[in-house]
Image: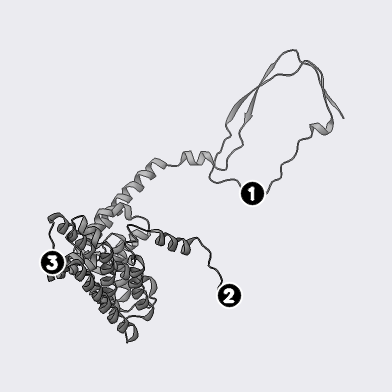
Amino acid sequence: MATEFLSLQRPFSLTHKMYRNPLPRVIHATPMTLKLRCSVSTRNVSLTETETETETRRSANYEPNSWDYDYLLSSDTDDAIELYKDKAKKLDAEVRSKINNETAEFLTQLELIDTIQRLGLGYRFESDIRRALDRYVSSGGLEAVAKTSLQATALSFRLLRQHGFEWADLCNAFLQEAKFLYNKSTPTFDDYFGNAWKSSSGPLQLVFAYFAVVQNIKKEETENLQKYHDIISWPSYIFRLCNDLASASAEIARGETANSVSCYMRTKGISEELATESVMNLIDETWKKMNKEKLGDSLFAKHFVETAINLARQSHCTYHNGDAHTSPDELTRKRVLSVITEPILSLER
């Protein structure tokens, strides 16, 4: 049946009282005044019966929401926030006290720091963690923990690395090189090289590599890492000597005196040519020692020994035709492109 609305000549207003649906915890409904203002065209409008039908929305018959707006407004949020703030302050102070406890066992401190960082709370205790690790290193904690378990030793290395403690020798080596440069002095070869093979960063790279490639970490191995075992020092010797050979002429021309070649010249009182030849002989002798380590019964796993030897190989490749690191030539660029961008061609053609 069609329904017809009569034409209205002007807008009209309706005021009607409606009641809000009662919430589960509200006893009495609250009256609410609803004002409607409608404007209708002056012409007659006819609607068919089908047009007046209201589409029914499907319902899954869920239970009423327990967390309605009124409930949230009625909760004591301000009091709860203050309560949680006070509790957080107490916990913060308690954790800070434990980190700064100088009488705690080394391993207990390390595990606490590790737990804090895994919870994502390290940013709140950065200065405290740093002081704790400073005490740990200066008090001989590294050596003490290494004697307890492999897990503790690995945890120790990881935390120290994360916080910039990269076995402090590297920083000291860099500082010593800066002193040589600042004082414009030419040290003896032994004084120079005793520091330079560490500043090459070779030991640091190999220690990181050890924990990356070795699956079954052994206590004896980690102890020898700290003592700079030959498999750590020999590749670092070659790394430094190859670097110095490639950069010696340019460094001497710039007036820089701390270099294997220039120090050998001063120590032996020989020419640059003879000093260069002597440095090359040192490299050959070191290679013989490494090959013997590779073929013999090494303390370390074979794949780590191979990794260490690869550092020496890489040094020759990088510095064979000059300093390809700081001054790459066309050959170096081609090598990089061949490894990264150019496809590997099949040998079967």
**Quadrant in the rendering for residue 149:** bottom left
Give the answer, above or below, for where 300 lies relative to 114: below
- Looking at the rendered image, the quarter that the N terminus falls into is top right
Q: CA distance from mark 3 to mark 1?
A: 90 Å
Label 2 Cα neighbours within 10 Å, binned few <14 / some 14-19 / many ≥20: few
> Hey, which residue is sitting farthest right in the picture?
1
Q: CA distance from mark 2 to mark 3?
A: 55 Å
Q: Secondary structure at mark 3?
A: helix
Residue 62: x %, y % from top left: 64, 49
Q: Are the residues tagged 3 and 1 within 8 Å (C-beta)?
A: no
Residue 321, which numbered label? Answer: none
Q: Amino acid at mark 2?
A: Glu
- Looking at the rendered image, the quarter that the C terminus falls into is bottom right
Residue 103: x %, y % from top left: 19, 65
Residue 118: x %, y % from top left: 37, 60
**Quadrant in the rendering for residue 50:** top right
Label 3, on which residue? 266
Label 1 Cα neighbours within 10 Å, binned few <14 / some 14-19 / many ≥20: few
Q: Can residue 16 be seen by looking at this rendering? A: yes
Label 1, on which residue? 62
